[in-house]
Amino acid sequence: MATTHEANTALSDVAARQLANATKTTAQLSTISPRWLVHLLQWLPVEAGIYRLNQVKNPADVRVACAQRDESELPQTYVDYDEQPREYFLNAVSTILDVHTRISDLYSSPHDQIKEQLRLTIETIKERQEAELINNPDYGLLANVADEQRISTLTGAPTPDDLDDLLTKVWKEPAFFLAHPLAIAAFGRECTRRGVPPPTVSLFGAQFLTWRGIPLVPSDKLPVDGGKTKIILLRVGEKRQGVVGLFQPGLAGEQSPGLSVRFMGINRNAIASYLISLYCSLAVLVPDAIAVLEDVEIGKYHDYPDTYK
């Protein structure tokens, strides 16, 4: 039996789409994060890529007296300096971006291919920057916590008591906790179990959980190993003797503080190359500017009874 098809009485969708322009998005990159740590640090420019951290040597030896109403002799003292201060050197997160000139010539409408390639590569470099600020074995936050500023959880999961203990380590104007999103979720569960849900605060248009008024800032750059992670508490700013970020000003091809993009030329294969470099480091000005809660378990959940008294 022959199949019959009804004739179209109007233009079909498929045919009409051939004359329509689709709205095209820019390339989306799922690895981009808010990078709150970079936003919340104070960034200091350094000369020649070197930052020398000078400290007072043996501060407890500085003698002072509360004068009595007599003619008692006043103490004599002076403030000594560390003769071998630590020097921080800026590190570079770099790559070379290659774009074929044929691609940029022919396929740059509506989105400029070179600008998009640069944007996505720079975003990736900035993600690596935050990871290095936390995990670099030389200048990273986790590598520069003094032994006396390290504590472990009481029972494994991060509890309000654990964060209270952490606050005793950085009690001078603490700025924020830095934790993996899974650690923040684990802390929220412990608060819910105790009936003390943490309040929230709005920063940069985003909502953050807080504890004792200190925001818990998420970063997926905190390592998670074997179901355990760490929570960091920081004081930031040079005037507060806290944690500061370091960058090199005045770079050739500077796009933002510490970031430069330089055109390297076109080779015989018609490929244009761009050198992208981000120079940065981080310094902890005094030991009590940072503390870390270790052995934070992120996989604990609680069963709640489904009956009422």
Image (spheres, rainbow, N blue to C red):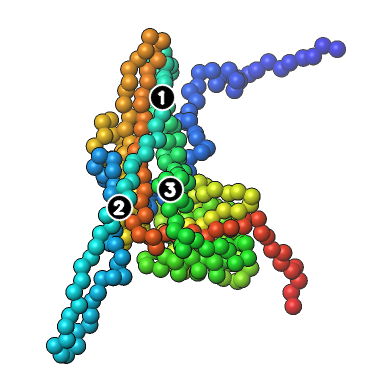
Q: Which mark is residue 58?
A: none
Q: Is residue 44 left or right of residue 219?
A: left
> What's the residue at 44%, 58% (across, down)?
146
**What kind of element bears circle 1?**
strand
Alpha carbons under labels 2 and 1: distance apart: 38 Å
Instruction: Using the image, determine if residue 154 lies above or below residue 111.
Output: below
Q: Label 1 amino acid?
A: Leu
Q: How many marks?
A: 3
For the residue pair 23 and 132, the one nearer the viewer reads as: 132
Residue 115 percent coordinates (x, y): 38, 27
Q: Earlier in the sequence, mark 2 or mark 1?
A: 2
> Local crowd at mark 2 within 10 Å, few (<14), some, or many (≥20)?
few
Q: Is residue 93 left or right of residue 44?
A: right
Nearer the observer, disc 2 or disc 1? 2
Alpha carbons under labels 2 and 3: distance apart: 18 Å
Nearer the observer, disc 2 or disc 3? 2
> Local crowd at mark 1 within 10 Å, few (<14), some, or many (≥20)?
some
Q: Is residue 121 visible?
A: yes
Which quadrant of the view contains residue 175?
bottom left
For the residue pair 220 and 306, the one nearer the viewer reads as: 220
**What kind of element bears circle 3?**
loop
Q: Which residue is mark 1?
A: 97
Q: Quadrant of the C terminus?
A: bottom right
> What's the residue at 20%, 77% (across, down)?
75
Q: Which residue is mark 2?
A: 85
Q: Which residue is mark 3?
A: 140
Q: CB under 8 Å between callouts 1 and 3?
A: no
> What's the residue at 41%, 29% (across, down)?
95
In the current view of this chain or complex, which residue is farthest to the right?
A: 1
Q: Label 3 amino acid?
A: Gly
